[in-house]
Amino acid sequence: MKRRALLALGLGGFAAAVGRRYWPQVTDNYLATAAGNDALLNFMAAGDVGTGEREQHAVAQAMVQRQRLATSPLVLLTGDNIYENGEIEKVDRVFEQPYAELLRQNTKFYAALGNHDIRTNNGEDQLSYSGYNMAGRYYTFSRQAVQFFALDTTQAIDSDDKSPWRSQLDWFETELRRSQAPWKIVFAHHPIYSSGQHGSQQTLIDDLSPLFAEHGVQLYINGHDHNYERTEPIDGTTYITSGNGAKLRPVDRSDWTAHASSQLGFTAFSVYADRIEVKAIDTDNTPYDEVSIALTGTQGAFAPGARSPSLA
Ligand SMILES: [Fe+2]
């Protein structure tokens, strides 16, 4: 199925998709529209960013523009933070330079480990790098009404020894049970539901989705597949692939797909007491997908009158 999608897109189409303008064209409409500054919390997510190439810089510039509309104190990185092998000596080129303006504004990045990140020293160098704010291979932190959980899904996918993953699941279940937060958001590298090249991961469907349903996790955000995809709610959880932060691959669709596309960008979230507004934004600063997620996990359009007709 994935190969068919690749062929269907064709080399020409893919080159055209990759060859979009790399520097953001900010429209008056976008800048004129207040979006999210009345929220409890704004944050952004970007994945598979660690190339240091112009595509990463283009997405980073779009994120800076987003800051002008909706100040986001934090950014989630969904793994593969440093290509090709997680070499920490590249962190200046693939993190500090591309995100210099965001860092200057004191935006705090919280990273998850990707499969490329653990190829050097099992990711330990990234764990101890202060810019990634990782309290461990998996960790949790809270902001406003949101509790975030970062998982190390490579332990589930690429490791023969599943005992570390079992320990991680025990920790995760304990933290979920202990949580009083109305919003629970999990981020990690590997997709659970995906129509991208790597596709859905049955191990994670089996191990994580029942916990999400039982404990009311409204959002799971991942990378690994180099595209954007949002699912319809599946047992109350919306799954968002935000792996288009520097590289692109084609994406197919599945029965549960609400939106899937292959273009560079990041995902912006505005958290309110009763909803989280999600926008997928490209390097032209144009939102190409938006949805409102309720506390119960259902999806809907933005509240009438809460926003201008502009998607921004
Ligand atoms: Fe990956």
Image (tube, rainbow, N blue to C red):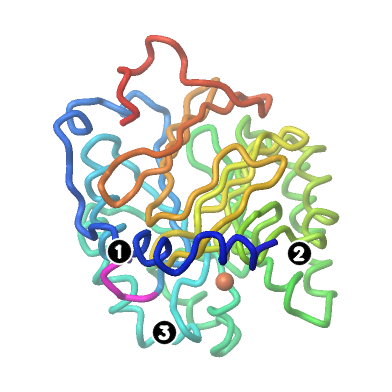
* Circle 2 or circle 1, nearest the eye: 1
First reached walking from the N terminus: tag 1 or tag 3: 1
Q: Which residue is at 45% across, 80% downward?
A: 83
Q: Is residue 175 left or right of residue 88?
A: right
The label number, if any, that marks residue 88 in the structure image: 3
Q: Amino acid at mark 1?
A: Gly
* Circle 1 or circle 3, nearest the eye: 1
Q: How many neighbours does mark 1 have within 10 angstroms: few (below 14), some (14-19), or many (20 or more)?
A: few
- Residue beneath label 2, please? 168
- Residue beneath label 1, please? 19
Q: Quadrant of the N terminus?
A: bottom right
Disc 2 residue: CB within 8 Å of ligand 1: no
Part of the protein shown in magenta: 51-55
Judging from the image, what secondary structure is the residue with disc 3 in?
A: helix
Of residue 130 and residue 193, the one placed in the foreground of this image is 193
Q: Could you tell me how far apart the alpha carbons at marks 2 and 3 are, in whole angstroms?
A: 24 Å
Residue 93 in percent (x, y) is at 29, 79
